[in-house]
Image (spheres, helix red, strand yellow):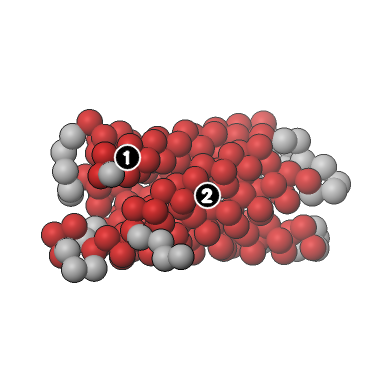
Amino acid sequence: MFLEGDDLLTIGAYFLVAGTFISAIGETMKPDENNFSKKFIRDGNGVQAVGNSLQGFGRISIAKGNEEAANLYGIIGSFTQAGGNSINTAANNIEIQDPSVSVSGFNSLGSTIQSMGAALEAAGVENGENNMLSNLETLGYSLISVSAILDAIGILIEDEKSIQKRLLLAAGGWLEFIGASLGAYVIIQAAEESV
């Protein structure tokens, strides 16, 4: 079975929604000795990395043979986000394995890279069609970009139980979920319209 561009975009969108939901749960939970919240964040970012990669390959597939449909910003943005998600996954895994090691700078870098990728995706959509769905998709990627920066700032606060850290992480996690849900809605609507 061979998946086409729209199929990859849709499946990737589902992975993104699931991954952001898992991460948001982890970012909302109280930190504990078992690192249960970090495991949710790690796993959610891993799922998001798969989703972003699928969307990148989907955009490449759509662009083949149709240069006008090529969304270079979207392609680069998808893979950039996947890279940021992978860094977040690795950083959280290191902290789970050895809590005495602080990799908050590395983890924050991953979120910052995610933010840049989402901003590139938003720019790619903004450069394309201008209709209600594309505006909604731009809003979704913009929310992901802003929320990833909130996450990056929250990660840098060393005190795990700090109210500021908990608020930044929770707000970032749930805004990212909302942004991914908006993006998924638009991708699914576009796929249904093309059938």
Q: Is residue 37 left or right of residue 171?
A: right
Most distant residue in the right direction:
33
Amino acid type shown at disc 1: Glu
Q: Position of residue 65 (x, y in %)?
A: 18, 68
N-terminal-most mark, 2 or 1: 2
According to the image, label 1 marks what residue? Answer: 192
Residue 121 image offset from top left, x and y in percent: 32, 51
Which residue is at a point 21% across and 45% down the rendered structure image? 126
Q: Quadrant of residue 76?
A: bottom left
Q: Residues within 10 Å of mark 2 (few under 14, many from 20)?
A: many
61 lies left or right of 155: left
Q: Is residue 35 above or below residue 94?
A: above
The residue tagged with tag 1: helix, strand or loop? helix
Q: Nearer the viewer, residue 105 or 147?
A: 147
Image spot of residue 180 (x, y percent): 45, 41
Kindly identify which residue carries mark 2.
15
Residue at left offset 25%, top offset 52% = 124
Q: Amino acid at mark 2?
A: Phe
